Image (cartoon, rainbow, N blue to C red):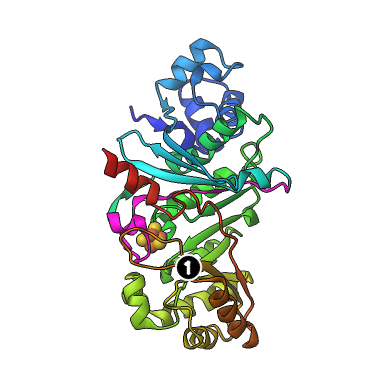
């Protein structure tokens, strides 16, 4: 009989499984809450489910919490976790700005969706490693559950309020698992995170952006644009050769036509690309889009050769966009004293083995 990962099950799937093994429907509800809301990591912690029922359930359902291999804490409160999966692969996950977030009611977790990544962006430590495999729903959800469990040991009221799919991997290339994870995060008997408090970040998988528009889960969409020039983007984000800027912009227009939701366009600013010409080209490209530009000063990543721009360069770049009528902001820097760029912690850890 197939063993199913408990953390990846919806409440409906658990009801069916309970019926199949002769347990009452309410057991499914209890199980769902223990796992998805209370973030328990073992069967023994499920106090209102008797030992006999737990044994029957564990014959059909596996419960594998992620193993915390390493944790880094930044001065600003950002916590970066390296988790080991059941097959020995490792992934990163970040709780952003925890200390300050405590006073402003916003706890954001950045999750990974793949082990490695096939896209191979030039500025990304994960991309340098190549693609290993997709994460299962249980592994995606498990990152948030295990961080919740970890932080609750010192802060019992801790609750994740926001999720960004911006960790390792391209979420739209693991589409079905990501959408299922979103529904689990959103469930009222689970973490109950509002759809609008979750954001998918993509490097520009145009057909999947259109599919997301029609599935319309009401989550936010962020597109890593980075440059308005195809030749440059081909180098930065090889996916651009498959879906060049005209196709990507058409998909974005379709997305906003169907969903009426504003897209965030992410632009990683390096010391080299923070020029007036680049900003003007971006403004022309985004003319007519319902979007907002988020400028991200690049964290230096060993092996990519990219340099961080200074504050003055960023200000001038933003001013050109603003003058052209493009809505723009600069992302707050987080965790710059730890290995905050995606994939860095994993690379360094593997290098030590
Ligand atoms: S930036 Fe995202 S899409 Fe690009 S290589 Fe890194 S993980 Fe993959």
- Which residue is painted at 62% across and 71% down in the image? 329
In the rendered view, does 152 fall on the left or right side of 92? Answer: right
Query: Which residue is denoted by mark 1 in the rendering?
Result: 209
Q: In front: 313, or 97?
A: 313
**Image quadrant assignment for residue 154:** top right
Q: Does 259 appear above or below 302? A: below
> In the image, which residues are magenta?
104-129
Q: Image point 55% across, 19% down: which residue?
A: 45
**Which quadrant holds residue 151?**
top right
Spot occupied by residue 121 in the image (x, y as percentages of width and height): 35, 65
Task: Please tell me in which quarter of the rendered image ligand 1 is found.
Answer: bottom left
Crowding at mark 1 (Cα within 10 Å: few <14, some 14-19, many 20+): many
Q: Is residue 124 magenta?
A: yes
Above or below, comparing residue 289 to residue 88 in the picture? below
Residue 274 percent coordinates (x, y): 48, 78
The C terminus: image quadrant = top left
Residue 92 screen position, x and y as percent:
42, 45
Using the image as rendered, state which of residue 329 and residue 255 is in the foreground.
329
Report the residue at 40% width, 83% height from top: 229
User: Is the N terminus in the top left, top right, bottom left or bottom right quadrant?
Assistant: top left
């Amino acid at each position: 009989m197939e063993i199913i990962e408990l953390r990846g099950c919806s409440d409906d799937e658990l009801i069916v499984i309970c019926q199949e093994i002769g347990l009452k429907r309410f057991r499914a509800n209890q199980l769902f809450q223990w796992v998805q809301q209370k973030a328990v990591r073992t069967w023994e912690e499920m106090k209102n489910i008797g030992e006999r029922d737990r044994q029957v359930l564990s014959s059909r359902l596996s419960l594998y919490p992620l193993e915390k291999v390493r944790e880094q804490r930044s001065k600003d409160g950002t916590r970066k976790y390296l988790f080991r999966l059941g097959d020995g692969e490792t992934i990163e996950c970040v709780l952003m700005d925890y200390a300050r977030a405590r006073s402003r009611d916003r706890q954001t977790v950045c999750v990974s969706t793949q082990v490695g990544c096939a896209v191979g962006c030039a500025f990304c430590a994960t991309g340098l490693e190549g693609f290993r495999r997709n994460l299962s729903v249980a592994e995606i959800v498990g990152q948030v559950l295990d961080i919740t469990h970890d932080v609750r040991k010192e802060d019992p009221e801790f609750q994740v309020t926001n999720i960004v799919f911006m960790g390792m991997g391209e979420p739209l290339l693991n589409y079905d698992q990501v959408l299922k994870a979103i529904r689990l995060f959103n469930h009222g008997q689970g973490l109950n995170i509002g759809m609008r408090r979750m954001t998918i970040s993509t490097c520009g998988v145009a057909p999947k952006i259109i599919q997301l528009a029609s599935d319309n889960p009401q989550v936010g969409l962020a597109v890593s644009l980075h440059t308005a020039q195809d030749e440059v983007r081909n180098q930065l984000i090889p996916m651009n050769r498959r879906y060049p800027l005209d196709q990507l912009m058409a998909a974005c227009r379709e997305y906003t036509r169907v969903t009426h939701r504003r897209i965030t366009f992410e632009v990683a600013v390096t010391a080299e690309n923070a020029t007036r010409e680049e900003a003007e080209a971006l403004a022309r490209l985004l003319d007519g889009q319902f979007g907002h530009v988020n400028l991200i000063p690049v964290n230096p990543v060993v092996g990519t050769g990219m340099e961080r721009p200074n504050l003055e360069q960023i200000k001038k770049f933003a001013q050109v966009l603003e003058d052209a009528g493009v809505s723009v902001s600069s992302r707050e820097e987080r965790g710059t004293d730890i290995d905050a760029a995606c994939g860095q912690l994993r690379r360094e850890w593997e290098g030590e083995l």
